[in-house]
């Protein structure tokens, strides 16, 4: 039977098409690679969190996307905090501790809560902000001693949500100092602090030993690793570490790693290993790794040479793929520059250092790695007139760095940045000292929007009479609010059998425009099937959309307002 001889009933069935809906998994897009830099979401206009000169200490983003920042006012030492709910630009600022606070650190916990520790001249204290809560718990004093000065706190979160803190205590009378650590048990009680350094042993009776910049990290089993910088009589400088494997109750004698004139940096990796970075006497960054607190350090590996005089040694930012990124500020290129290098785990090599900043970077930067593996860097640099200063940001995603983007203004500022699971970021900055010309604590956010359809044009019927393989008889279109790199459209009949699967790769575009020739995947005339496409509301779902960073958004729910 020729196509023109179709019965009226058969012909009508052939032209009825499905009521189409676009199903996109309710995801939020992550940061995109440099190749798609033009489609990055913008940074929001900076907002003021506090209008008095203050020292910004830390910022974190919780599991549900809430941002929390802490700072101390220079004139009073009062500790303030601010919170911004997920998908909001509104911050709320309150007082956290009405005492003279020296330093403070935050940590986001797996259950969505946040822990904070802070030091004063005679104690270290902590508090917890429960998930979804608007007030902190009552402060708990971890340790106190009026004869010592508490300083340099650090926090770590274990695989089971346990918390560990480390800090230094300097005796007022002698000037000697040591590092101490404690852990917070599940019932909310801190363990008795344990000394984890032995500077006094190195110093002996006649000298004096001091420790600085203690840091703590959990391994994948729940063991602990501590690093610190030790000097003896201001002449003997060493990188030191100590460990307490999972199940152990005491800390052993610290291990001397190497000579160094700059404090080391310590961090955990997603695979449970711990990485240590320091700068050797030749000005080279060295990196070591240990699989756990119970294992030994690997041999040092050179990461970058000729790094000048960095403001501080970079933190090892380790991704789930094993890649390690270092970011630091130095003057090796003549003026201040934010530079970076990445260890490629697949090839076992470090990349040549490259510069992220475009102008004269100023003495400090902050870098963080998000759970999705993207690295976010924030720094201040002088504007072209060299009279003003701006805060800039760059992102590493998909192996490529974005061009530097201006986040806001500021002069002589200290910067902090945090990123969430999908690559959205929050930046907070404030005056770096009491003589800074800036007076306010400022914040800005870069948020990837929820992927959704903004416009659609979906023909409800298609006429198959006379169609051939080159035909384009059905041409729907959707427009999304963010780029979609690839999509898959599946057409099914009333029996649930797949008639045809269409795919597309628009790259960084927001338009999805499939074309169907009216035939099955094998090229058969669609009318040869006794079934027909249902015109009574059975949806054709657009599944497996991939955003511009290569992240899948699987279908499964219909978008409101679509036919």
Image (spheres, grey):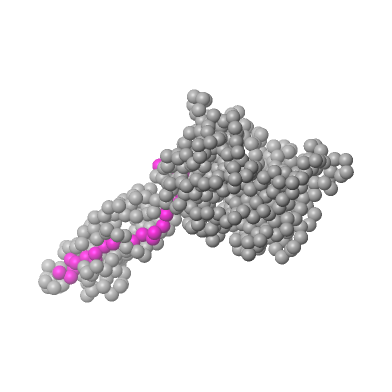
Is 423 or 334 nearer to us in this picture? 423
Q: Residue at x 37, y 54 (%)?
A: 451
Q: In terms of image quadrants, where is residue 297?
A: bottom right
Q: In terms of image quadrants, where is residue 517?
A: bottom left
Is 105 or 16 nearer to us in this picture? 105
Q: Position of residue 484 (x, y in %)?
A: 37, 52
Q: Is residue 218 magenta?
A: no
Q: Tell me: residue 511, above or below residue 232.
A: below
Q: Tell me: residue 415, above or below residue 486.
A: above
Which range is magenta? 12-38
Q: Quadrant of the N terminus?
A: bottom left
The answer to whether one can see residue 91 in this image is yes
Q: Residue at x 63, y 61 (%)?
A: 188
Q: Position of residue 402 (x, y in %)?
A: 48, 42
Q: Tell me: residue 135, above or below residue 39.
A: below
Q: In this image, 185 relative to 463: left or right?
A: right
Q: Residue at x 63, y 58 (%)?
A: 163
Q: Residue at x 82, y 46 (%)?
A: 200
Is 24 or 444 nearer to us in this picture? 444
Q: Is residue 24 magenta?
A: yes
Q: Position of residue 483 (x, y in %)?
A: 37, 50
Is 38 or 422 nearer to us in this picture? 422
Q: In terms of image quadrants, where is residue 469?
A: bottom left
The answer to whether one can see residue 230 in this image is no
Among all residues in the image, which is located at the extreme right?
205
Q: Position of residue 555 (x, y in %)?
A: 37, 63
């Amino acid at each position: 039977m020729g196509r023109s001889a179709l019965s009226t009933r058969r012909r009508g069935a052939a032209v009825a098409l499905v009521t189409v809906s676009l199903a996109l998994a309710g995801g939020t897009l992550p940061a995109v690679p440099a190749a798609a830099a033009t489609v990055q979401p913008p940074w929001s206009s900076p907002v003021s969190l506090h209008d008095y000169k203050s020292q910004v200490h830390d910022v974190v983003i919780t599991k549900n996307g809430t941002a929390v920042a802490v700072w101390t006012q220079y004139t009073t030492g009062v500790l303030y905090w601010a919170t911004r709910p997920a998908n909001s630009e509104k911050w709320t600022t309150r007082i956290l501790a009405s005492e003279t606070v020296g330093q403070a650190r935050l940590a986001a916990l797996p259950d969505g809560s946040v822990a904070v520790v802070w030091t004063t001249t005679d104690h270290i204290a902590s508090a917890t902000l429960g998930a979804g809560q608007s007030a902190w718990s009552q402060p708990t004093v971890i340790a106190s001693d009026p004869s010592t000065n508490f300083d340099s706190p650090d926090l770590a979160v274990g695989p089971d949500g346990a918390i560990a803190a480390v800090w230094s205590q300097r005796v007022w009378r002698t000037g000697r100092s040591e590092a101490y650590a404690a852990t917070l048990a599940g019932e909310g009680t801190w363990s008795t602090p344990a000394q984890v350094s032995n500077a006094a042993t190195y110093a002996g009776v006649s000298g004096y030993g001091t420790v600085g910049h203690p840091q703590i990290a959990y391994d994948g089993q729940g063991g602990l690793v501590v690093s610190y910088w030790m000097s003896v009589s201001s002449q003997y400088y060493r990188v030191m570490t100590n460990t307490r494997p999972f199940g152990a109750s005491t800390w052993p004698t610290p291990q001397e790693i190497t000579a160094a004139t700059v404090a080391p940096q310590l961090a955990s990796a997603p695979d449970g290993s711990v990485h240590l970075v320091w700068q050797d006497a030749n000005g080279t960054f060295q990196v070591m790794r240990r699989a756990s607190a119970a294992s030994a350090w690997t041999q040092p590996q050179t990461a970058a040479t000729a790094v000048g005089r960095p403001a501080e040694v970079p933190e090892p930012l380790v991704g789930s793929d094993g890649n390690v990124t270092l970011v630091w500020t130095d003057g090796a290129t003549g003026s201040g520059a934010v530079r970076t290098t990445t260890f490629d785990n697949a090839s076992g090599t470090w990349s040549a250092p490259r510069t992220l900043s475009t102008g004269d970077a100023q003495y400090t930067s902050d870098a963080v790695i998000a759970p999705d593996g993207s690295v976010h860097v924030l720094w201040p640099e002088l504007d072209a007139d060299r009279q003003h200063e701006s805060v800039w940001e760059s992102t590493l995603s998909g192996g490529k760095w974005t061009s530097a983007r201006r986040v806001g203004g500021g002069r002589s500022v200290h910067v902090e940045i945090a990123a969430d699971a999908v690559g959205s970021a929050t930046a907070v900055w404030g005056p770096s000292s009491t003589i800074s010309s800036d007076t306010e604590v400022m914040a800005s956010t870069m948020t990837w929007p929820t992927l959704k359809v903004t416009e659609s044009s979906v023909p409800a019927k298609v006429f198959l009479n006379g169609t051939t393989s080159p035909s384009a008889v059905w041409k729907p279109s959707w427009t999304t609010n963010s780029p979609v790199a690839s999509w898959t459209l599946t057409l099914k009949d009333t029996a649930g059998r797949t008639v045809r699967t269409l795919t597309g790769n628009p790259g960084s575009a927001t338009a999805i425009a499939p074309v169907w020739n009216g035939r099955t995947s094998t090229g058969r005339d669609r009318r040869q099937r006794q079934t027909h496409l249902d015109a009574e509301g059975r949806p054709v779902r657009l599944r497996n959309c991939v955003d511009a960073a290569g992240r899948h958004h699987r279908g499964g729910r219909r978008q409101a307002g679509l036919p």
